[in-house]
Image (spheres, rainbow, N blue to C red):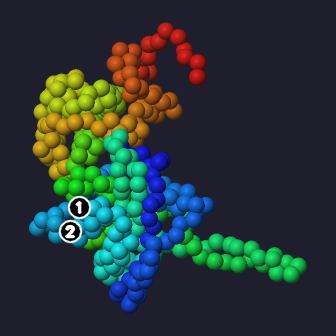
Amino acid sequence: MINLFNAQIESLSIHRVGNKSRNEGIFLSASPYNLEDEIKPLIKEFFLKSFREKEENYYHFVHEADLEFNELYNFANAVFDSSDRIHEVSKKITTLLFEQSSHPHIKSGEVYVVYFDNMQLDNEKMPAIGIFKSELKHDFLQFEEKGSVLDMIVQQGINLNKLDKGALIFNKNRAEGYKILSVDSNRYDTKYWLENFLGVDVLADENFNTKNYLNFCKNFAKDVVLPAEDKKEEVMFMNRSMDYFAKNDKFEESNFLNSVIDNPQLVPEFQNYKVEKAPKYKIEDLSDFPIANTAVTAARKKIKNVINLDTNIQIKMDFVNPESAEKFVEKGWDEEKQMYYYLVYFNKEEKS
């Protein structure tokens, strides 16, 4: 879990890269940028806002031969070994990005290399390297007094509310390729940023495993539980699944199945579904793993716990107290009306 509130910018280098296929060049600043105090909060928010709003999916540096051949990994090592080399190394980082900027779709833009101090990851303070790129220019208006009239001038600049590309390399797990976060708002060239430049792969940690297993469960509920049972049981399966993940520190598959599946006939269906779908969710070899609370919280917000009826009525289940729906909600069939019904038991109506 990251906390970026107290992060401080210790060094900022700004360069520019063009597109090689269009014979656009590269501009490397001779010295770090002298960041004035009044602009520091704005530029810090520009760099870090997207990471606070994005789900935490970590990456790490990789290389098909050996990690030591990953250039950006070596650049990170050099900076973390001696932070006063950050500007010198920022030129090499920008040159590496330029060498990968040959596809016609890749846009020119400014490159910012930042050395952060006081980053917090997993309740531990540490430095981090930020690499950011701004690509899209936006029109904005400036106004200037000219004699007796106010003149309107159209200019172009960067929108500080949206970062185009960025990566945070935390000084943690060096031997495994560090822990890295990435954002990329331009999806058409993701391979260029993640694979060709950063040289990273998904870090299969507890956050990754928890998120993927819950996504797998959500689709099992939709594809298997719903057709075999009904909408209530689909929602209840996910209620029980979320409850299991919320109340346990470690996932153990046999214990999980005993806790969440009421119908014994669905157990082999679950196992068959996992064999078929596991590669998609990268859970082939997962039967036990530590549970990440942050991933559970994020998944809870995305999973629908509402039964929508064709009579314009909704029944909302509670993920916090899933046993309530099992105890106090019953489904039946009314012969006279030839309609299904839900019977809900309660003692009193709660004030909203």
Question: Would residue 241 appear left or right of 265 to someone viewing this image?
Answer: right
Q: Position of residue 186 (x, y in %)?
A: 41, 67
Depth check: give the residue in front, 240 or 5: 5
| Type of amino acid at the residue the image marks with label 2 | Asn
Depth check: give the residue in front, 95 or 90: 90
Q: Position of residue 253 (x, y in %)?
A: 16, 32
Dividing the picture into quadrants, the one containing residue 191 is bottom left
Above or below: residue 309 compared with residue 46: above
Residue sitting at 27 percent across and 62 percent down?
Answer: 81
Residue sitting at 74 percent across and 74 percent down?
Answer: 143
Depth check: give the residue in front, 221 or 13: 13
Residue neighbourhood size for the residue with mark 1, other residues' Cα within 10 Å, grouped as few (<14), some (14–19), many (≥20): many
Q: CA distance from mark 2 to mark 1?
A: 7 Å
Depth check: give the residue in front, 313 or 77: 77
Q: Position of residue 213 (x, y in %)?
A: 24, 41
Above or below: residue 348 compared with residue 140: above
Above or below: residue 46 compared with residue 18: above
Quadrant for the N terminus, please: top left
Residue sitting at 86 percent across and 81 percent down?
Answer: 147
Question: Would residue 42 appear left or right of 53 to someone viewing this image?
Answer: right
Quadrant for the C terminus, please: top right
| Type of amino acid at the residue the image marks with label 1 | Phe
Residue sitting at 19 percent across and 62 percent down?
Answer: 62
Question: Would residue 271 appear left or right of 328 to someone viewing this image?
Answer: left
As drawn, the label of residue 61 is 1
Secondary structure of the residue carrying numbered label 2: loop
Give the labeled residue for mark 2.
70
Q: Which label's residue is closer to the chain start, 2 or 1? A: 1
